[in-house]
Amino acid sequence: MVDTIPALVWCTLPDGSNQFHNQRWHDYTGLPEGAETAWGWRVAYHPEDLERLLNEFQSIVASGAPGEMEARMRRFDGEYRWFLIRAVPFRDETGTIIYWYGSSTDIEDRKRAEEKLRQDERELRRITDAIPQMIFVHDATGTPLYANQAVLDYTGLTVEDVTTSEFPARIFHPEDIEKVREEHMAAVSRGVPFEIEKRARRKDGQYRWFLIRFNPFHDEQGRPVRWYGTGTDVEDRKRAEERTRNENVALREEIDRSSMFEEIVGASAVLRRCWRRSRKSLRLIPPCSSRVKPGPERN
């Protein structure tokens, strides 16, 4: 029955030395029966994985609890493939371990898929790092998960720093955090795109205004599982807006002063015409320096 099971099955003694490997294991490795005796089974594993595998297995044996390991096993044609190795203790009536039973499952396809995913992630990071704009990713609750190189360069922080829950408090102005907290949380709870403006601290300590936009990514049930955001420096725009506001205030004050003078002059049409002509005449008079003609030269 054990030889017919479509899996690599084995049994060792309490110290980890071999007791039995089924026929499937021999067929896969190409090793003859008896080659796995005692610790002979080690020749089937990749030399780079063997020391780690032995240490992990000895830790499992010492704990007396079931455990898992991963290692590359050599096939009969010489190709190494990744295997998930599970070990479970078998105890007698007194609770003493008398055997370790285990199985080895081919996970090569899974490992390749994981490596492909890591490569894709590295490529995506290279792309986002090359974009000259701040990009960040938050989880469903708003906890930072990722930030691109532009964020790291601006803040002077590390990847570990920007992926903690304390990151927002470290870079955003305290006044802005409190001001937009409710708006931020309300938008997150609704799961809809939103944008806010905050001052972010640069690595030299200076705060600059940023327009921060967030878009949610929803799962199949429509629940937001990720928030993707960008940060755009709008400091120059904010300063221009402030200058415009100041100029408008000055203009309003000038208009108010003019209106007050008109009221002092009176409401008579004749007086108002005279006042407008006087203002026009004052504007037409050139500066004093322009009106003075140079005198004749003296010998």
Image: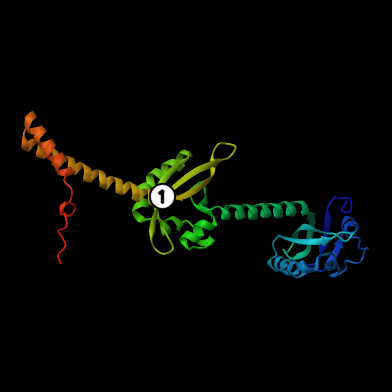
Q: Residue at x 48, y 63 (%)?
A: 156
Q: Quadrant of residue 95?
A: bottom right
Task: Pick whichever, 269 or 165, lies toward us.
Answer: 269
Determine if residue 163 is in view: no
Q: For this rendering, which residue is in front, 156 or 253?
A: 253
**Secondary structure at numbered mark 1:** loop
Name the spot of residue 241 as percent of width and height, x first. Answer: 33, 46
Q: Is residue 219 above or below residue 107?
A: above
Indicate the position of residue 1 as horizontal and vertical percent values.
Answer: 88, 51
- Based on the displayed image, in which of its 4 quarters is residue 264 positioned? top left
Q: Position of residue 194 (x, y in %)?
A: 45, 41
- Name the quarter where the C terminus is drawn: bottom left
Q: Position of residue 33 (x, y in %)?
A: 93, 63
| Residue under pointer 1 | 234
Residue at image point 51% right, 60% down: 152
- Note whether 122 is above or below 265 in the view shown: below
Position of residue 299 in the picture relative to residue 96 (left or right): left
